[in-house]
């Protein structure tokens, strides 16, 4: 039981390049989330999904797109990377969006945009 | 004003000390509060959650919510070097919208 996994662990991009971050969970969770974590800003929600085929915007969605074609996977795309997108990205999943239902986080992807 | 505010620290304490970590929040409608622990270069993991006011204890950890002052606390008794991590407070706004504090970095010295 791997929990939540993220690919890749590290990546360096040049401004304007694109990339996709992959999140996979093996807990059959309905809800999945993408966060970014920056010093002094805490965790901020980028996009989330409440089930297969659904996605919605979070607090800081600009410059990112997501897809949830399969229940176990949640992809985060950067179409044209900017230095402001340098951050640590965390994926999380939970069975529901209710409190008391634990949110499980992946190990993170460290992205640097030059 | 941020919806959840947390002193970033760092906080250094000797092994065995009682640690007090605190957050304030702005919206009196928030009901659920969580504490996460995040080790360096790892994802956050849920430590405890509480509902409304009162205390909740789990081993060496106690979470406390004071709704009258919009103040949440995490106490760690008999702190250990393995407790050295960043502690994040969080609340839930409606469903699925978790709001996190910036985290307090704790170092327990052996």
Image (cartoon, coloured by chain):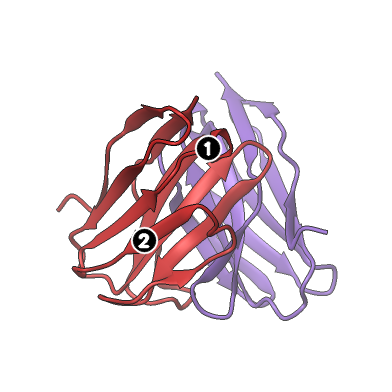
Chain colours: A red, B purple
Residue B27 percent across, percent down from the top left? 77, 73
Q: Is residue A43 left or right of residue A49?
A: right
Both marks 1 and 2 on one chain? yes
Chain identity of mark 1: A
Chain identity of mark 2: A
- Residue sitting at x 21%, y 70%: A71
* Residue B98, placed above or below residue B59: below
Q: Identify which residue, A64 or B20, lies in the foreground.
A: A64
Q: Identify which residue, A94 or A82, lies in the foreground.
A: A82
Residue B33 percent across, percent down from the top left? 60, 67
Report how far apart the C-alphas of labels 1 and 2 lie in the structure.
17 Å
Q: Which residue is mark 2?
A: A66
At mark 2, the secondary structure is strand
* Residue A55, placed above or below residue A44: below
Tell me the quarter of the image containing the N terminus of chain B.
Answer: bottom right
Residue A21 percent across, percent down from the top left? 31, 46
Which label belongs to residue A82?
A: 1
Please give the count of numbered marks on the rendered protein. Answer: 2
Residue farthest to the left, as pictured: A1
- Residue sitting at x 41%, y 43%: B43
Instruction: Give the foreground label among 1 and 2.
Output: 1
Q: Identify which residue, B62 or A102, lies in the foreground.
A: A102
| Pointer 1 or 2: first along the chain | 2
Which label belongs to residue A7?
A: none
- Residue sitting at x 38%, y 57%: A92
């Amino acid at each position: 039981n791997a929990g939540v996994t993220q690919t890749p662990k590290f990546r360096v991009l040049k401004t304007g390049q694109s990339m996709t971050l992959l999140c996979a969970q093996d807990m059959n969770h309905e809800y999945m989330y993408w966060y970014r974590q920056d010093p002094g800003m805490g965790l901020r929600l980028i996009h989330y999904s409440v089930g297969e085929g659904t996605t919605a915007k979070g607090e800081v969605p600009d410059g990112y797109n997501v897809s949830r074609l399969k229940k176990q996977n949640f992809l985060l795309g950067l179409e044209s990377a900017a230095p402001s997108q340098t951050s640590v990205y965390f994926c999380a999943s939970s069975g529901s969006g209710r409190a008391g239902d634990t949110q499980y986080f992946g190990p993170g992807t460290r992205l640097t945009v030059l | 004003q941020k919806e959840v505010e947390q002193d970033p620290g760092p906080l250094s304490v000797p092994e065995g000390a009682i640690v007090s970590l605190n957050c304030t929040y702005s919206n009196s409608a928030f009901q659920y509060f969580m504490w996460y622990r995040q080790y360096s270069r790892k994802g956050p993991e849920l430590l405890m959650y509480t509902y409304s006011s009162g205390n909740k204890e789990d081993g060496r950890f106690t979470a406390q919510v004071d709704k009258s002052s919009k103040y949440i606390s995490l106490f760690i008794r008999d702190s250990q070097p393995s407790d050295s991590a960043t502690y994040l407070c969080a609340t839930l706004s409606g469903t699925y919208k978790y709001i996190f504090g910036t985290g307090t970095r704790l170092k327990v010295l052996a």
